[in-house]
Amino acid sequence: HRFTFRPDHGKYLLFFGRIHPEKGTRECIEVARQTGMKLIIAGIIQDQGYFDLQVRPHLCDDQIIYVGSVGPEKRDKLLGGAYVLLHPINFDEPFGLSVVEAMACGTPVIAFNRGSMPEIIADGITGFLVHNLDEMVEAVVKAKQLDRLQCRKLIEEKFSADRMVQDYIGVYEKIIRQKKV
């Protein structure tokens, strides 16, 4: 409920996360260059050396923009206003909170097919799971065909507080049944 659904595709690519080699900020810059689309980078700088060498030299006022860390209001606006969220992770991430938040706003996600991404993204429905930068660039073009409402529906079904409560109740009931036996 803290994320506003936006039915229309935005006009920029978004990287939203910590600035670190394992999160793929530099890869997002390359996707923006190849597609000619604007990229907004939001997040804390966790690796200053990486930022100084791999990100800062590519920043410019019109195509590659770094906005820093953002609070809840700006986060909702950035995530919901994006064309897609790019998530080219370079490690087996156990969960992608920004991925869920983007889809809650209706924004599709294009992510490397690693870690928890196949459990969060419905490939071809709420985004695309890719294996490399070339596939990511191709997926950016195809993302316009995705229905943003499907992104929101998937998040409501899989990640809402109501769904989690029901799952906990189910676990408790199972434990109680086992204790009675």
Image: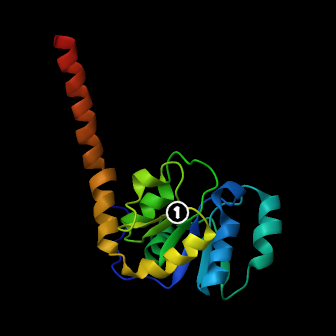
Side of 95 where 88 appears, left or right: right
Side of 7 where 40 appears, left or right: right
Residue 63 shows up from this direction:
yes
Q: Looking at the figure, which quarter contains the N terminus? A: bottom left
Counting from the top left corner in percent of width and height, residue 131 is at 57, 62
**x 52%, y 57%: residue:** 113
In the image, residue 37 above or below residue 165: below
Crowd tier of the residue under label 1, counting other residues whose Cα lies within 10 Å: few below 14, some 14–19, many 20 or above = many
Secondary structure of the residue carrying tag 1 is strand
- Which of these two is toward me, 70 or 181? 181
**x 40%, y 63%: residue:** 123
- Which of these two is toward me, 119 or 54? 119
**x 59%, y 62%: residue:** 88
In the image, residue 172 above or below residue 102: above
User: Looking at numbered disc 1 in the image, what kind of residue is underneath it?
Assistant: Ala
Q: According to the image, label 1 marks what residue?
A: 111
Residue 66 shows up from this direction:
no
Counting from the top left corner in percent of width and height, residue 25 is at 67, 66
